Amino acid sequence: MRNYWLQGSVTICSLALAMTLCATSLSAQSNMSGQNGMAAQGNMAEAAQKLEKMSQQLQLTPQQKQQIRPILMEEAPQLKALKNDTSLGPMQKAMKMREIGQATDAKLKPILNPEQYQKWEMIRTQERKQMMEGAADR
């Protein structure tokens, strides 16, 4: 009888431990996916804000906005990762940012009409100039 009671106690403790481990694992996974979800939402919000600004500046058509949205959604996490990368110096970051911008511009060129693209290039040049002035002030 005593052996039976001991076996039951060990089984209950084992089940409790297993349930605790599962709950901890699920909680950790939930936090990770929550952080990824928040990052994705941040990227979406950033891209949406940029798209709205572009739309106003370039008078984009609804079709153009629809075509540009995924391009900006692809660009946003790249820029965020670059901004958070502490292994690169300011000059390396600037060069990498320029590469990302050029890749985005190449994708935008066939979507924008010539006047819009020319205006977009002027906006990009102004943004780069402001960025360089900001970096020089630091």
Image (cartoon, rainbow, N blue to C red):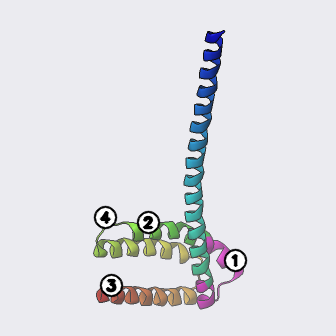
The label number, if any, that marks residue 81 in the structure image? 2
Disc 4 marks which residue? 87
Residue at position x 60%, y 67% in the image? 41
Q: For the residues marked 1 and 4, what is the alpha-carbon distance in whole angstroms?
A: 39 Å
Secondary structure beneath disc 4?
Answer: loop
Given contact means CB atoms under 8 Å apart, are the residues at marks 1 and 4 in contact? Answer: no
In the image, what residue type sits under mark 3? Ala
Q: Residues within 10 Å of mark 2 (few under 14, many from 20)?
A: few
Whole-number angstrom distance, CA of label 2 to CA of label 4: 11 Å
- What kind of element bears circle 1? helix
Earlier residue among tags 1 and 4: 1
Name the disc covering residue 135, or none: 3
> Magenta stretch: residue 57 in it?
yes
- In the rendered image, the vertical position of residue 82 relative to residue 135, given as above or below: above
User: Marks 2 and 1, Cα distance to the nearest angstrom?
Assistant: 29 Å
Front-lying residue, 45 or 127? 45
Give the residues in magenta.
53-69
Foreground mark, 2 or 1? 2
Q: Which residue is found at the position 64% from the left and 25% from the top?
A: 12
* Disc with the residue nearer the chain's start (1 vs 3): 1
Give the amino acid type for the residue marked by disc 4 in the picture: Ser
